[in-house]
Each structure stands twice: as structure tokens, then as C-alpha cells.
Image (cartoon, rainbow, N blue to C red):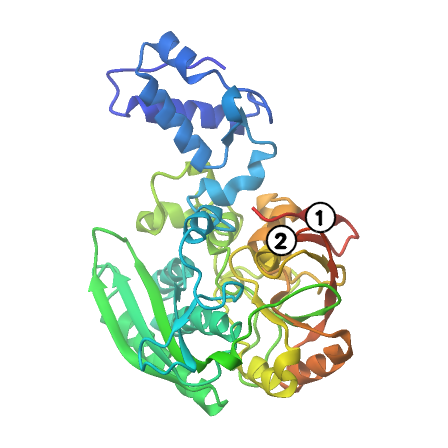
Amino acid sequence: MKLTVDNDAATPVFQQLVDQIHFAISAGELAGDEKLPSIRSVASDLSVAPNTVAKAYRQLEFRGLIKAQDRSGFVVVTDSADNRYTARGVSADKTEVHDAVDQLEQGLFPGAFCKITEDYLSGDPTKCNVIHADGAGTKSIVAYLWYKETGDAGIFRGIAQDSIVMNLDDLLCVGVDGRILISNTINRNALNCPGEVIAELINGTESFLQSMRDQGVNLYSGGGETADVGDLTGTLVVDSCAVAIMDKRSVITNDISGALAIVGLSSTGQAIYEGQANSGMGSNGLTSARHDMLSNHYAEQYPEAFDANVDPELVYCGPYRLSDPLPNSNFTVGEAILSPTRTYAPVIYRMRDAFREALKGVVHCSGGAQTKCLRFGRNTHFIKDNLFDIPPLFSAIQSASGTSWDEMYKVFNMGHRMEVYVPASLADEAIDIASSFGIGAQVIGRTEPADRNHLTLTDRQGKAHRYWPS
């Protein structure tokens, strides 16, 4: 690999280095595990400042293309094509976020799914507070593309549900079953997302909250904020915040250990409280889904719908339009990607009533997907060897992107998005409860004692994948 710089070019020198090295890796000129020239040697050869080279290497490291190896410098990441998620500016398992958050005070129940504090709101020593923030992520951008192509603003009702469910289903994992107050924040570019979009988001929020109350899940609106931030986003971002007060004695602490059955709740099909069939998409992995599935037509027509800093080869590089049929399914590609995120609240409420303290853990397979469980319990070997069939959408994403199956299970739920951990004697009852709501469920694995947490996942082809905590 020969590096050159043009000091008269408009492109900054560090970016020229990033572009050349990135291309060399993509083109196979630099192989996996191959060592890069040292920062000092590159700086000397090109007569540039060492900090400029260091900045370029940091950007490539952030993209997941190279990694530091102690004092030996940087090497190319093996199978860097599998790190497309990182190269697009997102993290599958949010390792860097957890590294920072783990240094903070962990609350009353450090092993719980969400941070739990004393009841600062009412001051009751027998109660605690839970607050959670999340959103629909880049799924909002796919809805925007649908809206621009079809003029159908109603698609944003599903985005309102996505944003709320990503909070609600995390709260389920700590046992919240009382009143929950929801607040929404919509950051939009008003030129591209006019009033009819906001109206559908607001109406979609109220409609979903009412549908949940009809199921005994007491969700209420606490208002929100719509901010016109055209300088920050070309489209829109939809986020929510949820807060609840609960009894300390009701907290599910995720005390996961050996000798438990893992019951997975399907992310596909149609629950009795859903108005349409679900593809299983949820609200994780949308950055990969939209770029790896959707064609360059969307980059050409809607430049506001992607970050210009991302490598052009990773921007809307798929084979499909939103209106194309999704192979082996009854969905179009757009319908599948935009399928509203399912909530499991009615199911988990029923299981909580039935099992009480025997419900040892509940894990929402969101960030980190099938590896999310590694963050909970201790000295546990998670064994997942009876997974659901892979839904057509995830098979199509893998086929279009060439992403390894090992990486797919870290980014996408792959067929079930909620896990409950119960004694094996209660597994059949858990499956029956889910089935009563029209949701498929099965024992997808078990836990065993171990020296430390790790996961062995056997895919539908019989191949074992092993994962360790980051």
C-alpha cells in the first residue's frame, strides 16, 4: 500500500489517509491481521504531523476497520466486511457506552435490566423509581423514505409505537406493572417533515397508548416536545422517555444462574392485540437493514437521508426498492422493515402474575440482540440451541449484505426479541401464556453454571457460535 497526500486539495490530509486506507482494505490490498505502518513512519514519509496520522487511524478504528494491538501498533481487523455496522457510525453492542456507564453508581439493584433508584418522586422508602429513554432510531428515516415515495404520512403511526415500545419493553424486564408516564421528543427538519407528519406521530402515540390500556397496561401521555432542528437532521428523530414508581419487592433483579430454561417469545406473526402481521424487525439494526437492503436510488433522490461522511460503498447499496416483494414472505420490503415493533407487555404482565418470584429473569434482546443476555446474571453459561426459524427479512438482509451469521446474531433478534428465564418445570406454562396471546414461544435454550458468563449459540444449520462479554 502506497500512501500519498495532496496538500493543495480541499479534502483534509487526515481524510485523504482515511480514504486511501479504507479503499485498500475494501479492495483486499490489506489483508486481515496485516500490520499498518507506524504513525511515526507514515508521518515521516509524507512529511505530515504525527497527530494527523493518529487522527486518521482513530477514524479507521471507529469504523471497525483497524484495531490497536497494545504497543505493536495497528492491524487490519479480520473479516472487516462483517463490521459494516460500525463503519456506518453505530455500535451493535454499545461497548463504549457500557464502559462509561458501568463506572457510574449502579442503583439499588445493580444486576437489574434498567437502573433503579430510591423513590425520589414521592419519598416512599418501600418504593423505587425507574426512568428510561430510547427511540425509534434510524427506522424513522425508512418511514421518511416511504413518505416521500408514497405521500402516506400514516406510516409514522408505526414509528410512534416503535419509540414507546423500546422503552416499555425494557421496563418490563425489571417488573414494572403499574402506571407508566410517557413523554415524546420529535426532532425534525420542518422543510422535509411538515405538520401532517407530526400529526400522525402524535395521533399514533395516543392510539397506541389507548390500545395498551385496553390490555391492562397503564400507559399515559405526559406531553412532549417537537423541535425544529434542521441544522442537525435532514429528516427526523423520534424519541421517548418513560418513568414509573414501583414497589421494591416487585423488582425483577435478573438473578440468572445455572439450571434455568430460556423461553423465547417470537418476534413474528400476529398477536391478538396487533392490527397486522409482524415481520420481526423491531427497532434494532435499522442502519444495516436500510443500507444493505435498499438501493442507491434512495441515496440519489434523498441525500438528506444519510450521513455524507459514511463510505459511499456502504450507503444504500442493496438490491431493493421499498415496494419490491420480500422473498419468501407476504410483505413488501418496505412493509417488512417498517413493521411496528411488537410489545410483549400483556404477555409479561400475565407471566409475572402467574410465576411471581419464579420469574428469575426477563431479557429484551435489543442492543446486542442474541448476546444481550451476557450482561445479566453471573457465572452463567447461556446455551441457545433450539432457536426459531430465521424470519425471511433477516435472511434477506444477510444475503444482500454478506454479513456473517456470527455478526447477524449480534445485530438482529433473528426470530425472538424477548426471553424469560424460569425453572424448567414452568416452561410449558410460559409457552401456553404466550400462545394465549397469539405469540409463538418455545424453549430456545438453558443456563448452566460456569466460571464466568458466556454464550454458546447454535444456529439453524447446526453451527455453534461462541460469545463472551465485551
Labels 1, 2: front one? 1
Q: First in sequence: mark 1 or mark 2?
A: 2
- Mark 2 element type: helix
- Mark 1 element type: strand
- Indicate whether 95 appears above or below 137: above
Q: Amino acid at mark 2?
A: Tyr
- Splitting the image into 4 quarters, where does residue 266 fall? bottom right
Whether residue 70 sits left or right of residue 189 in the image: it is: right
Residue 149: x %, y % from top left: 37, 61
The residue wearing badge 1 is 465
Q: Amino acid at mark 1?
A: His
- Indicate whether 264 appears above or below 384: below
Whether residue 89 sits left or right of residue 6 in the image: it is: right
Residue 363: x %, y % from top left: 58, 67
Q: Mark 1–mark 2 contact, CB under 8 Å?
A: yes
Closer to the camera, 100 or 201?
100
- State the CA–CA distance, disc 1 to disc 2: 9 Å
The residue wearing badge 2 is 409
Residue 416: x %, y % from top left: 63, 66
Count of all numbered marks drawn on residues in the image: 2
Residue visible at 66% across and 87% down in the picture: 436
- Splitting the image into 4 quarters, where does residue 190 fall? bottom left
Closer to the camera, 127 or 176?
127
Residue 444 visible, this angle? yes
CA neighbours of label 1 inside 10 A, class few (<14), some (14 to 19), many (20+):
some
